[in-house]
Amino acid sequence: MMLLQYQDDGSRMILVIFSLLLKIVGAVVCSSKAKELNRSTGGWGFFGFISPIIAMIWIHFMKPNIEWDKK
């Protein structure tokens, strides 16, 4: 019985590590894509960390934010 409980904890640890890696990758991907599109890198990095899959899909369908010359 103890062996089954130990394996369950190991599976949980692997899931936590995978989830954390996905969040970090999501934050980096969203932040770099936001920089290409002239958008807020911090905001998109945070969104990519909180909800990585939705944020990565969302930002890849956005158009660039055009910066006009201010005179």
Image (cartoon, rainbow, N blue to C red):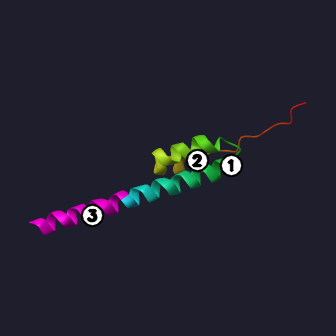
- Whether 15 is among the magenta residues is yes
Q: What SS does tag 3 mark? A: helix
Q: Nearer the viewer, residue 67 or 40?
A: 40
> At 52% across and 53% down in the image, what residue appears?
26
Judged left or right of residue 12, residue 38 is right
The residue indicated by pointer 2 is: 59
Q: What SS does tag 1 mark? A: helix
Which residue sits furthest bottom?
3
In the picture, which quadrant includes the C terminus?
Answer: top right
Q: Is residue 62 above or below residue 1?
A: above
Query: CA–CA distance between discs 3 and 2?
Result: 32 Å
Q: Nearer the viewer, mark 1 or mark 3?
A: 3
Residue 24: image x %, image y %? 50, 55
> At 52% across and 48% down in the image, what residue appears?
48
The mark nearer the N terminus, 3 or 2, is 3
Identified by mark 2, the residue type is Ile
Query: CA–CA distance between discs 1 and 3?
Result: 36 Å
The mark nearer the N terminus, 1 or 3, is 3
Q: Specify start and end residues of the magenta stretch as a single range.
A: 1-16
Identified by mark 1, the residue type is Lys
Q: Nearer the viewer, residue 33 or 20?
A: 20
The residue indicated by pointer 3 is: 11
Identified by mark 3, the residue type is Ser
Q: Is residue 53 above or below residue 7?
A: above
Residue 33: image x %, image y %? 64, 52
Query: CA–CA distance between discs 2 and 1?
Result: 11 Å
Checking the image for residue 35, the label placed there is 1
Q: Is residue 62 above or below residue 15?
A: above
> At 58% across and 47% down in the image, what residue appears?
59
Q: Nearer the viewer, mark 2 or mark 1?
A: 1
